[in-house]
Image (spheres, rainbow, N blue to C red):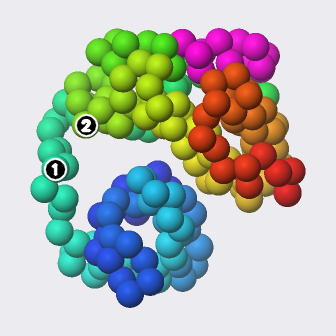
Amino acid sequence: MKIGDRVRLPPTLSQPGGEYRIVALDDSDVHLISTKGWVKRRVARDQLTVLAARATPAPTTVLVPDAFARDEGVLSRSGYHVGAAAAMPAINRQIVLRRVFEMPAAKLPAGNDEAYRAEWGEERSEKRLSKLARCLESFISVHLTRGLEYQRSVKEWREDLEWLDKELGAPINTWFLSSS
């Protein structure tokens, strides 16, 4: 069990079931975030295996050996990068975002993972715009409390999220634009 691993969990009285990604580990707990609705969840380390064993896989989830590895998603494969290591000016990042927004679905760099490609919708669609906004919002959410080394990345994701809102009319949650 390590950060980045995915696990399917059953619903509880207060949390929805589904696929979650491990975002942090401490001595007693595993911190997870859902891959669909960005629900945060905390599970005791010793209970994670028990819960995962009770989860039933979604009937629409087909696991095939050549499925696209989502550790590197459409944005990354399209050339979108942030932070000091990338040193990418805002205009270049936003050009990539516009290209992804306008790219035909069949050309999205999603490997053979058709379910993942379908999440992005058709070119220039509300679904595509919403997916772009949700990606940036999730990047912010996951990295917001990870320390100073992600401060520049979070700032750049916020800039790009604001650009999506102003330039393309993306449906965004304005909480992600706040500086807190």
Quarter of the figure with residue 25:
bottom right
User: Can residue 4 be seen?
Assistant: yes
Q: Quadrant of residue 158?
A: top right
Q: Which amino acid, mark 1?
A: Thr
Residues packed near mark 1 inside 10 Å, few (<14), some (14 to 19) or many (20 plus)? few
Q: Residue 145 placed where, x, y %? A: 74, 59
Disc 1 designates what residue? 60
* Position of residue 117 in the picture relative to residue 30 (left or right): left
Q: Which quadrant would the C terminus be assigned to in this image?
A: bottom right
Q: x and y percent of residue 165 in the render?
A: 69, 33
Point out residue 94 in the picture as x, y percentages from the top left corner.
68, 18
What secondary structure is found at the residue carrying circle 1?
loop
Q: Amino acid at mark 2?
A: Ala
- Relative horizontal placement of residue 11, taking residue 131 as reference (left or right): left
Q: Residue at x 44, y 13 (%)?
A: 103
Look at the numbered discs 1 and 2 and tell me whether their residues touch, using CB distance below 8 Å.
Answer: yes
Q: Is residue 113 above or below residue 49?
A: above
Disc 2 target residue: 115
42 versus 179 height, above or below: below
Which range is magenta? 87-100
Task: Please tell me which residue lies in front, 52 or 15.
Answer: 15
Q: Is residue 139 visible?
A: no
Q: Residues within 10 Å of mark 2 (few under 14, many from 20)?
A: some
Q: Position of residue 130 (x, y in %)?
A: 51, 38
Check disc 2 and report its element: helix, strand or loop: helix
Q: Per the image, is 9 magenta? A: no
Query: What residue is at 37 percent from the left and 13 percent from the top?
Result: 104
Q: What's the residue at 46%, 51% (across, down)?
A: 4
Sequence-earlier tag: 1 or 2: 1
